[in-house]
Amino acid sequence: MLSNKHFIVVGLGKSGTAAIKALLNRNAKVTAYDENVNATSPVDHPKFSLVTGPLPTQFPAVDSIVVSPGIPLSHAAFQLAQKNGTPVFGEIELGFRLRPQSAGPLLGITGTNGKSTTTALLGEIVKHQFPNTFVGGNLGTAFCTAFEHVDSKPFDFHVVEMSSFQLEGIVDTSFLGAAILNLTADHIERYSTLEAYGDAKARIFLNQPKNGFAVLNADDVHCQRLETKAHVPVSHFSISKSADAHMSGVDEFSSKGIGFRVKNRALRGNHNSENAMAAVLMAQHAGIKNDLIQRGLDTFGGLPHRLEFVREVRGVEWINDSKATNVDSSLVAINAMQKNVWLILGGKGKGAPYAPLVKAAKGKVKGILTIGSDAPVIKQEFMGEFDIHECGTLSEAVKKANRFSQIGDTVLLSPACASYDQFKNFEHRGDAFKVLVKEL
Ligand code: ADP
């Protein structure tokens, strides 16, 4: 079908590379563009060529253009191509078009926070009933990887994390189930308003089938505004009020009248209860048996760098929450803790005030250990109310926390800052922390 069709793939990241491989395996011709002049070809194939450097103002005439999520579709060259009748879409759309007839449905998850956790958890749950389930998208494996080979065995389900950028690039992609977890102004650099950002998220409802279902957060007003965009029955979850899924105890919730436990270290905190309720509603609608859903809640191992349990050393629990690169994320982490916390904070600050953390830390945090370039600002904010130890480096912070902590305490790395002043990225920071803790 695609034999000798010519595609342009823009962006050589994970999704662009997956798109290229899937297309070449179908005998299409592919020209890739990447702005990075040092980019190298991900494949060695006679039908593949690579153009590096700034994107042209006009692309050559081709059959379709596949754009990576990092590149805005508003770029003049895409607008022009579309005007000239060339279809322009994202890698998810390509995957959707390449999937075999017998492939199972898509369950999509979006929102500002909690997408990866909810996707991984729903994947875990669905796999207990359908082991042959694809889990990926924005998280982990690119969607096109599921259809890389023409003759690969079709998946029974596809649990797909969708960023707003990926949702901008869909055309016909249809999600049997679609969840929007929440909406905050965290990522609005690419959108002029929160409304525009929400509209991009609501594209997840665009082509849902008649038997489709949607899941929304009843506690989030911005999320609720998007309900009108859904054309299928909507189920709600809430941490505070009665809804289709709502908390019935500290570690318990009921969803569609069935009780579930969330006594899993990987799912602590109210934010994770929300993620769990969203995943459970999606699973119930998708036909997963309730006992298998409970099993998934119990077996879920969590994702690295998100309130990740590292180890216990002499009765002290060590937790890696390096993914908390802003104040909001560290706030949910502190709120998820019981008491007696030694909190490692700092890195490259994002300019947001730390005041919400000071409030949440009261009565819970025994001491603050600061690292990185924003340490003076953090000290200023917490001074007077807390014991503050300036450590400079993560290794010093781990050393000091180990010295100060006592049986029953928790040491939490939840920096509320980006990592770039001392590390390559948050993963690098979290991995460094885990190595230091394992050496104690
Ligand atoms: P995403 O993929 O949307 O970035 P993750 O599951 O990776 O989400 O979680 C990222 C961070 O967002 C977590 O470390 C936590 O601080 C915060 N978070 C997770 N779930 C929620 C939620 N439901 N509401 C608010 N914050 C959350």
Image (cartoon, rainbow, N blue to C red):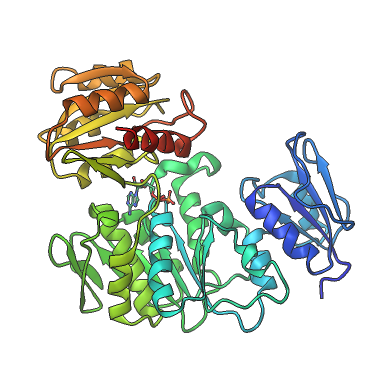
Q: Nearer the viewer, residue 269 or 109?
A: 269
Residue 426 found in image quarter: top left
What x and y, as percent, mark residue 129?
41, 80
Residue 57 visible to an observer of this rendering: no
Task: State left or right for residue 62 relative to residue 201.
Answer: right
Residue 280 visible to an observer of this rendering: yes
Task: Identify the residue shown where x is 43% and y is 55%.
Answer: 116
Residue 29 found in image quarter: bottom right
Task: Identify the residue shown where x is 37% and y is 79%.
Answer: 285
Say if 326 sits above or below 108 in the image: above
Q: Nearer the viewer, residue 319 or 38?
A: 319
Task: Identify the residue shown where x is 39% and y is 36%.
Answer: 435
Task: State left or right for residue 162 relative to residue 276.
Answer: right
Task: State left or right for residue 277 relative to residue 204.
Answer: left
Task: State left or right for residue 430 relative to residue 28.
Answer: left
Q: Quadrant of the N terminus?
A: bottom right
